[in-house]
Image (cartoon, rainbow, N blue to C red):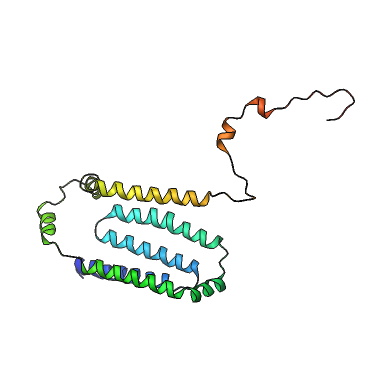
Amino acid sequence: MTPALIEALLFYLFAFMTLGAAGFVVRAANPVHSVLYLIFAFFNTAALFLLLGAEFLAMIQIIVYVGAVAVLFLFVVMMLNINFTEIRENLARYWVIGFLLGMVLLIELIAGISSYQYAPEAWRQAVANPIPGGVSNTEALGVLIYTDYIYAFQTAGLILLVAMIGAIVLTHRKRKGVKKQNITQQIRRTAKNAIEVKKIEPGEGV
């Protein structure tokens, strides 16, 4: 077999396993199994990146998504006490809202796909201006992100920052019966406020 045929077979193999794992993520009844299928889909996606020659994206896919995000999902799901009976009751109760949201998402996907336009001039520009020899994919990707797409990259970072701040605010809300650390009060604390000196006479208790 020729190298091109082997590469094509590997592409279809990894693509089929990625789609199958993504389907099992949705169809699995156990949330832990869903996360494991998600990790399997991430590994196959990384293999597809390797076939495209994007080794940096493949390593990022494994390190960030598999090593951090998916493992975090797995630990969170395993530590949560999920009540499947309550989930089924809520599903039966809110199926109308879920159906409407699903239809809105479907309309958005159809609108996005229908508005796609093939740009042959972009392909000609990529062919006419290839990556110079001696430049790695990581360096070429960094130059592209921090020159042509710097504003989009910074905007995406700001969106993630806002999401992180929102998650912190939601988890640090005030609740009764929960003790919290007051950093400002601890920093302002002095020895005069922290230590109380009492004079105890002989033969007397505290």
Tell me which corner region of the image, top left, top right, bottom left or bottom right, holds residue 109.
Answer: bottom left
Which residue lies most toward the right here? 203
Please say if 81 is above or below 133: below
Q: Is residue 47 left or right of residue 32?
A: left
The quadrant of the rendering that contains the N terminus is bottom left
Whether residue 191 is visible, yes or no, is: yes
In the rendered image, residue 76, in percent from the top left (x then y), is placed at: 51, 59
Whether residue 6 is visible, yes or no, is: no
Q: Is residue 157 left or right of residue 27?
A: left
Quick one: 101 or 75, which is closer to the camera? 101
Q: Tell me which residue sits at (24%, 68%) in the image.
A: 113
Q: Tell me which residue sits at (35%, 73%) in the image.
A: 103
Tell me which corner region of the image, top left, top right, bottom left or bottom right, holds residue 105.
Answer: bottom left
Quick one: 150 or 186, which is closer to the camera? 186
In the rendered image, residue 39, in percent from the top left (x then y), is placed at: 41, 63
In the rendered image, residue 196, in percent from the top left (x then y), is placed at: 72, 27
